[in-house]
Every structure is written in structure tokens, then in C-alpha cells.
Image: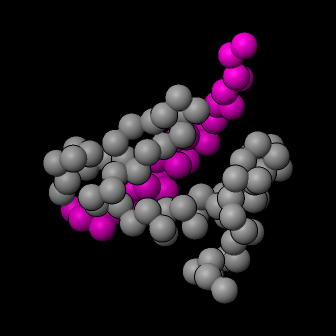
């Protein structure tokens, strides 16, 4: 039997792309062609560029986005380690 794959809606993927561009560390990147991401996976989730994007800051913003939307929180909330605090670093 094939496992059903949860797919992220395109509207949320578009928001994730905007988030990635806000967390670029370098102006020019040849790895991602200045997009701040290298592609998407089979779940329609963004794969940030490890060379020019601040992955931690992007993930922290993504967690806030997920927790603010009940539909996403139901799908992905259990895979996020802890509820983020706005303006916080996520560390205890």
C-alpha cells in the first residue's frame, strides 16, 4: 500500500517563498539563482538554499505562520518541536 503524502497548498508555498527571500544572507547566489530556495519536495514544501538563506530564522518564521493557521497546525504542528514565541529565538 502506498502512503498518502500530505501536500502543502500552493498559497502557503507562495508565502514560504516570500519568507525565504526575507531571510537571504547574500545578495548574489549561484546555487539558487538568487531565489533563496533550491526547489520543492514531494510534499510541496520549500527547500531553502543552504548557502544564502538563514535557515533558522526562516524556520522560526515558518513555525509562527503554521501555528497561526488551524489547517496547517493540524497537518504540521506535531512535526514542529515547540510553539514559537513572536520575537523570540525559540530557545529556552
In magenta segment, residue 4 = yes
Quadrant occupied by the C terminus: bottom right
Q: Is residue 17 visible?
A: yes
- Which corner quadrant of the image does residue 33 belong to? top left
Q: Does the segment drawn in magenta span residue 8?
A: yes
Q: Residue at the spot x=71%, y=23% of the render?
A: 4
Looking at the picture, the colour scheme in use is one colour
Q: Which residues are magenta?
A: 1-27
Residue under the image location 47 percent in, 51 percent down: 18
Q: Quadrant of residue 12?
A: top right
Residue 8 pos. (x, y %)? 63, 35
Position above or below: 17 against 11? below
Taking the spot 53% from the left edge, 49% from the top edge, the residue there is 16
Look at 72% across and 68% down and name the residue there: 82
Q: Position of residue 60 (x, y in %)?
A: 58, 67
| Marker count (numbered) | 0
Position of residue 51 measured from the top left corner of the image (x, y, whole percent): 27, 58
Percent x, y of residue 54: 39, 66
Report the side of 42 relative to 23 (left or right).
right
Q: Residue furthest bottom?
A: 92
Classify residue 72 as left or right of residue 25.
right
Q: Could one spot residue 87 in this view of the protein? A: no
Query: Quarter holding the N terminus?
Result: top right
Position of 40 relative to 78 (above/below): above
Q: Residue furthest front?
A: 1
Q: Residue lying farthest top?
A: 1
- Quarter occupied by residue 88: bottom right
Vertical placement of 25 versus 50: above or below?
Answer: below
Q: Is residue 16 above or below residue 58?
A: above
Amino acid at each position: 500500500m502506498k502512503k498518502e503524502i500530505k501536500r502543502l497548498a500552493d498559497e502557503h508555498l507562495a508565502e514560504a517563498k516570500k519568507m525565504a527571500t526575507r531571510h537571504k544572507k547574500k545578495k548574489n547566489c549561484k546555487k539558487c539563482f538568487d531565489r533563496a530556495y533550491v526547489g520543492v519536495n514531494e510534499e510541496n514544501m520549500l527547500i531553502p538554499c543552504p548557502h544564502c538563506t538563514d535557515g533558522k530564522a526562516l524556520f522560526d518564521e515558518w513555525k509562527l505562520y503554521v501555528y497561526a493557521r488551524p489547517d496547517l497546525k493540524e497537518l504540521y504542528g506535531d512535526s514542529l518541536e515547540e510553539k514559537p514565541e513572536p520575537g523570540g529565538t525559540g530557545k529556552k
